[in-house]
Image (tube, helix red, strand yellow):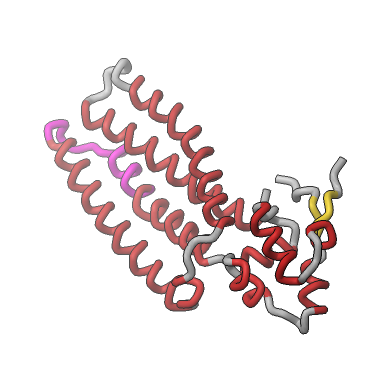
C-alpha cells in the first residue's frame, strides 16, 4: 500500500474519530442556551487537539513501518491522485457551504452557522481522503 | 472507474532485464515502487514523460512497451 494511501486512511479515521462525537454532542446539547457557544467552542478545540495528536502519532507509526517509502517525495501518481481527489472534494464543499450559508435564513444561531460551515469542511475533507483511497486502490 | 485501455509489457521487460525489481525501475524513472506496480496492473496510465523514460530504460520504442487497446 502506498505511503500516501496509508496517510489518507489515517486522516479519514482521525476525522471520523474526532468529529463524529463532536457533532453528536453539539447536536444533542441540552444545557442552557447561554452556555452553548462556550460548550461548542471548547469541545471543538478539544477535538482539534485530539485529532492533531491522533493523526500525528498514527502518521509517525505508519512512517516507521517503512521509512524509505515515507521519505520518498510524492511522484506523478501521488500528485494526480491528490489533484483529482481535491477537485471532486471541492464539488462537495461548494453545495455544503451554500447549505451552511442558508442556515442563516433558517434562523440558526451564529454558533449553529459556524458548526454548519465546519460540517461542510469536514464533509469535504472526508470526501477528499476517501477519494484518494479509491484512486489508489482502484485506479481510474 | 474502468481500467485505462492501455496495456503494457513492463512485467515481461523487467523479467528479460534480469528480474529488475519494481523498486529499481521506479528509482530509475523517478516514481515509487507502488506506482510501477499500479502501471503494470493497468491501474494507472503514466505521463508521456514517464512512459518514454520506461521505454528508454529497456532500450525499446514506446509502442513495444505500451499499446492502446481501446477503440
Q: Residue A138: in sight, yes or no?
A: no
Residue extending farthest to the bottom is B18
> Residue at image x 29%, y 20%?
A104
Residue A128 drawn at (x, y percent): 49, 46
* Vertical placement of residue A124 versus A71, above or below: above
Q: Position of residue A112 (x, y in %)?
A: 27, 30
* Residue furthest out toward the left: A34
Q: Which portion, as a residue range, is magenta?
A: A20-34
Position of residue A44 in the picture relative to residue B32 (left or right): left
Location of residue A71 with respect to A97 vertically, above or below: below
Q: Give the side of residue A132 with respect to residue B19, left or right.
A: left
In which quadrant will I find the N terminus of chain A? bottom right
Q: In this view, does A14 lie above or below A110?
A: below
* Residue in front for this viewpoint, A124 or B6: B6
Picture quadrant where residue A56 is located: bottom left
Quarter of image, res A63: bottom left
- Which residue occupies 32% across, 38% down? A118
Q: Determine whether, in the image, residue B15 is placed left or right of residue A79.
A: right
Residue A54: quarter of image: bottom left
Residue B41: x and y in percent read 74, 62
Name the main secondary structure of what is drawn in magenta. Answer: helix
Q: Where does residue B55 sit, x and y in percent of width and height? A: 74, 64
Q: Does the magenta stretch include residue B48?
A: no
Tally of numbered tags? 0
Residue at image point 51% right, 72% down = A69
- Residue drawn at x 25%, y 57% is A49
Q: In this view, does B41 lie to the left or right of A23?
A: right
Q: Nearer the viewer, residue B70 or A112?
A: B70
Amino acid at each position: 500500500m502506498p505511503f500516501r494511501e496509508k496517510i489518507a486512511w489515517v486522516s479519514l479515521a482521525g476525522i471520523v474519530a474526532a468529529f463524529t462525537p463532536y457533532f453528536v454532542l453539539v447536536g444533542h446539547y441540552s444545557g442552557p442556551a447561554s452556555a452553548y457557544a462556550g460548550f461548542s467552542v471548547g469541545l471543538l478545540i478539544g477535538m482539534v487537539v485530539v485529532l492533531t495528536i491522533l493523526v500525528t502519532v498514527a502518521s509517525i507509526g505508519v512512517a516507521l513501518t517503512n521509512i524509505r517509502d515515507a521519505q520518498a517525495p510524492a511522484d506523478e501518481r501521488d500528485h494526480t491522485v491528490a489533484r483529482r481527489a481535491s477537485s471532486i472534494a471541492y464539488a462537495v464543499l461548494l453545495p455544503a457551504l451554500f447549505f451552511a450559508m442558508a442556515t442563516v435564513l433558517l434562523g440558526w444561531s451564529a454558533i449553529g452557522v459556524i458548526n454548519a460551515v465546519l460540517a461542510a469542511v469536514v464533509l469535504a475533507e472526508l470526501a477528499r481522503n476517501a477519494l484518494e483511497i479509491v484512486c489508489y486502490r482502484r485506479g481510474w | 472507474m474502468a481500467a485505462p485501455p492501455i496495456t503494457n509489457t513492463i512485467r515481461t521487460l523487467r523479467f528479460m532485464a534480469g528480474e529488475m525489481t519494481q523498486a529499481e525501475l521506479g528509482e530509475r524513472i523517478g516514481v515509487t515502487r507502488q506506482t510501477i506496480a499500479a502501471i503494470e496492473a493497468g491501474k494507472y496510465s503514466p505521463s508521456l514523460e514517464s512512459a518514454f523514460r520506461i521505454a528508454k530504460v529497456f532500450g525499446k520504442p514506446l509502442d513495444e512497451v505500451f499499446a492502446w487497446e481501446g477503440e
